Image (cartoon, rainbow, N blue to C red):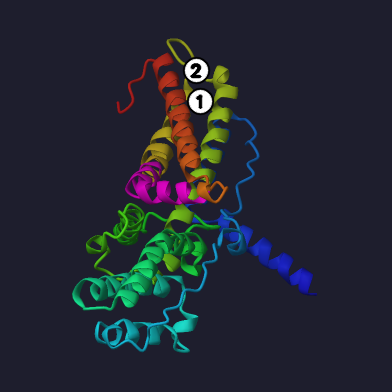
Amino acid sequence: MRSILLFLILILNGCDNWFNPENAMFDKYHQRVANVLEAPAIPIELQSTVTIPAKRVLFEPLPRLSIGLLESYQLRQCGLFNLLAEKNSQLGKVQDAFHDFDYQTALLRVMHRCLSEFPLSDEERATLTELYSTKWQHLDIHLDNLLLVSDAMQKQLTASDWLSQDTTNDIARINDVYRIFSEMYDLPHRAVSRLPDVEVTQYQEELEKSRLLGRLYYSMVNTSLWLKATTQLLEQNQSNVLCGPNRDTTQFRYLRNVFQSIYVEEVQPYLAYLDSTYQQLNDGATLVENRMQLHGHQYGIIEAHRTFRQETLNHVQFWQGLFKRCGVTVGN
């Protein structure tokens, strides 16, 4: 019974994706072209989901560091004791990757303040300096665990549905957080003054709910499949499309109508939207790709965009060639 229920859920999800407005648009376009050409539609197997490796594969454990100087008066005065006590509380021990990263940056600031503004003993200074240096060395690992392993980013980078053109307000905010992540990776060692002034936790919910990069990836992959199939359909049957003087141009005129009413008015704006969204999120996409590669894995969104661009170009070039052959200037 449980297996049957799971199967039905998968089937229903598949149906939802197939009748998604974006997918329905490409399906309509392909079917209309096939109808005009009086040719069978080309079967298309869409990619069902965009995934990334499991958390256990990408997670990098870090050694637990401790300070044996908590009774120091100076460390209490400079705020380090209170920060560590908060982290070691029951609530602090169950922090997610976003709260933990904000804690790590706060800890670096406080440790820098303790070292630069308070009179420490030689032992205190030596111990704290060593710990401070180690914490800086670990910062990229904390950031990797946030970027690739946190619940919010695992959802942000994966998807099984299309990116809607209504998704515009999220793009700038999501781009902001990827910019912050990039700046963090580029920080020189001990450049405490260049730590971000914002807490990354404020972006956590948006990253989790929007699935922006994952949906963009999914949409580019499946758009490429639709465009490739439709271009193939046109190329295989173009010899049947007649044009020129004293020829029956009915099929060409119908085909031109499909181009104008569906491709130009519906498909092309969506293609432009996907490409524009990718350009805005390019730094984030590149960052995820590079960090994933350092873990020995491929994300694949850069290649997906390259393929998307190529299939778009191939499709446009077919129409340009057809209109040139038939002596028609697009737009007239």
Across and down, in percent, residue 284 comes to 38, 51
3D distance between C-alphas at marks 1 and 2: 8 Å
Boundaries of the magenta span:
271-292
Q: Say which element carries label 1.
A: helix
Which residue sits furthest left? Answer: 117
In the displayed structure, would residue 60 be above or below residue 201? above
Residue 4 drawn in magenta: no
Amino acid type shown at disc 1: Gln
Q: Would residue 102 be seen by someone viewing this image from the given angle?
A: no
Which residue sits furthest front? Answer: 122
Instruction: Kindly indicate whether the residue at mark 2 contacts the one at mark 1 (C-beta within 8 angstroms).
Output: yes
Please give the residue where the numbered disc 1 appears in the rendered image.
251
In the displayed structure, would residue 72 be above or below residue 197? below
The reply, left or right, for residue 25 in relation to residue 101 is right
Q: Would residue 22 be seen by someone viewing this image from the given angle?
A: yes
Q: Nearer the viewer, mark 1 or mark 2?
A: 1
Identify the residue shown where x is 43% and y is 40%.
Answer: 262
Identify the residue shown where x is 37% and y is 15%.
Answer: 327
Q: Say which element carries label 2.
A: loop
Across and down, in percent, residue 294 comes to 51, 48
Q: Quadrant of the N terminus?
A: bottom right
Amino acid type shown at disc 2: Asp
Identify the residue shown where x is 37% and y is 86%.
Answer: 70
Please give the residue where the numbered disc 2 appears in the rendered image.
248
Residue 274 drawn in magenta: yes
State the residue in front, 229 or 88.
88
State the residue in front, 189 or 313.
189
State the residue in front, 266 or 116.
116
State the residue in front, 169 or 196.
196
Q: Quadrant of the C terminus?
A: top left
Disc on res. 27: none
